[in-house]
Amino acid sequence: MQNATPVPVHVVTGFLGSGKSTLIRSLIEQKPEHERWAILVNEFGRIGIDQTMFEARSDVIVKGLPGGCLCCQLAFVMQATLVNLLHRHRPERLIIEPSGLGHPAGLLDVLRGEAFSEVLDVRDILVLLDPARLDDSRSREHETFRDQLSMADAVALTMTDRASAAQLGEAWRHAESLWPAKKWIAEAPHGALPIERLLGSGAHRGEEGAATSVDHDRLRHSAGASVVLDDFAMAQPSPGCPLQESDVALGYATLGWRWHPADVFCLDRLTLALDRLPAGLRVKGVLHTDVGWKLFNRAEGSISLTDSAWRQDSRLELIGENERLPAAESVLSTLQGCRLGSGTGTSG
């Protein structure tokens, strides 16, 4: 596979809840009219929420790869998906959003491997940093969190609109202390980043074969060659009977459900139920409610509820450290009680 001109690839990384999808949507809004973009969205959870955040349009192709980490568990699937995207859609630019727990080194190994070495041009890796994360010692000491910051070429400080002056100052000091020194550090309030940061980026300066994570290496070896594309063909839930998915890896656990699009939730009851979930959980979903389709997003204490163009099914996912995730049966029972109409059912 070879193109006359290599396709620029931009990796937008960052820990859980740092606002990667929001920032990419902001960049799409500034996209040059003549360019066709492909967006590859990877999620740690198996439900696939982030891909629903992007509205369908002819000049932006969005492909979601839920259910693991691109650099290890889904490396084979990612290669096949990239080949399909490049051949079928011929994008002028590719943006990859790894999972919040994704390690950049393994992803770079794939992008710079023999299959894509003449096809893709890996540009500056951008890492997003939420200042509030630095207050959490567990995040600050997490190997992937540190390595994402270390390997990046540039840093965008997100969630600055809800950070205190002290938090923002500490985030600047932390970013400026990183080694190798970053090409640039900028604030991106509400995920807004000037498109020039993307279009004017240079080549990623990291060396090939950069050290990866021991935990990610284990996942890569355990995935082996048994991962097939058919694993990601999602079954359709029946009305009233959500399909449940869960997983545990890298010290975190995920729990999620998909409902039939005909299932409608009472928004008032639903938001109250979600608000009662344990603090510290990452909660995101796209849901059919009595006031329309809504996108719910909770990260590091910040909650947003916006309209959504998604109509295929309702989805909700919880992500948290292993010991902090609540019991699936209890959460599902509460969620089922938020649906309009009578009767409940489960399917896992």
Image (cartoon, grey):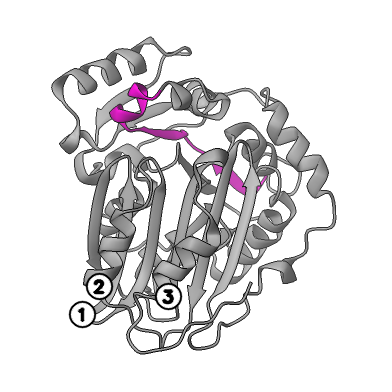
Q: Is residue 248 above or below residue 341?
A: above
Q: Which residue is mark 1?
A: 291
**How far apart are labels 2 and 3 at the CA level?**
13 Å
Give the residue at x 67% y 27%.
212
**Residue extending farthest right:** 225
Q: Secondary structure at mark 1?
A: loop
Q: Secondary structure at mark 2?
A: helix
Q: Which residue is mark 2?
A: 267
Q: Along the line of sight, which residue is nearer the eye, 332 or 61?
A: 332
- The amino acid type found where label 3 is placed reads Gln
Give the residue at x 38% y 40%.
280
Tell us which disc is closer to us: 2 or 1.
2
Q: Is residue 73 above or below residue 15?
A: below
Q: Are marks 2 and 1 in contact (CB under 8 Å)?
A: yes
Q: Secondary structure at mark 3?
A: helix
Q: Which residue is mark 3?
A: 336
**How far apart are labels 2 and 1 at the CA level?**
7 Å
**How far apart are labels 3 and 1 at the CA level?**
18 Å
Q: Is residue 111 above or below residue 306?
A: above
Query: In the picture, residue 183 is in which quadrant?
Result: top left
Quarter of the image with the C terminus in it: bottom right
Q: Is residue 7 visible?
A: yes
